[in-house]
Amino acid sequence: MEAIVNFDGSHASIKLVGDFTFESHRPFKEANQNVMSRPEVESLLIDFDGVEYMDSAALGMLLLLRERFGERAIKLTNTRGTVRAVLDVANFGRLFELD
């Protein structure tokens, strides 16, 4: 998986491309560290448009991100199909804004 980071003032985005699995740990962590190293970032959008599959390890990575990002807003966008089903079953709509 590839994780592409962009910044726009106080907003950051991470575009995910490829399957979001345990093997995605390193690129996802590096992208998150890049975002969290900037104190001016108040919100994060994670774009799942390029993701067709995610596993339980991906859910764990998202939970860790939620914990580390604190009260700042995180939106998961372009979640559909299998990815959206996994997020819904895990009740991630209670932790993240889902689109």
Image (spheres, rainbow, N blue to C red):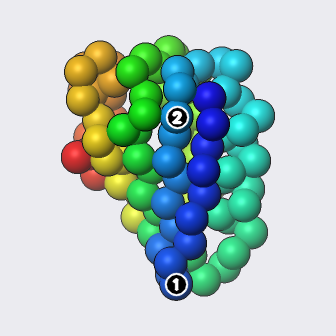
Q: Is residue 93 above or below residue 74?
A: above
**Based on the displayed image, in which of its 4 quarters is residue 27 positioned?**
top right
**Based on the displayed image, in which of its 4 quarters is residue 43 positioned?**
bottom left
- x and y percent of residue 39 in the render? 66, 79
Q: Is residue 13 above or below residue 7?
A: above
> Label 1 crowding class (10 Å Cα cut-off): few <14, some 14-19, many 20+?
few
Residue type, label 2: Val
- The quadrant of the picture occupied by the N terminus is top right
Determine whether the residue tagged by mark 2 lies in a helix, strand or loop: strand
Tell me the residue that label 1 is attached to. 9
| Residue 77 visible in the displayed image | yes
Of marks 1 and 2, the one in the foreground: 2
Residue 17 circle label? 2
Q: Earlier in the sequence, mark 1 or mark 2?
A: 1
Q: Is residue 61 left or right of residue 43?
A: right
Q: Is residue 72 above or below residue 25?
A: below
Residue type, label 1: Gly
Determine whether the residue tagged by mark 1 lies in a helix, strand or loop: loop
- x and y percent of residue 58 in the render? 54, 26
- x and y percent of residue 64 in the render? 60, 41
Q: How many marks?
A: 2
Which residue: 43% across, 28% down?
A: 51
**Based on the displayed image, in which of its 4 quarters is residue 93 positioned?**
top left
Most foreground residue, 59 or 46 = 46
Most foreground residue, 5 or 65 = 5
Spatial CA span between label 1 and label 2: 23 Å
Residue 49 circle label? none
Which residue: 58% across, 19% down?
A: 21
| Residue 96 visible in the displayed image | no
- x and y percent of residue 6 in the render? 57, 65
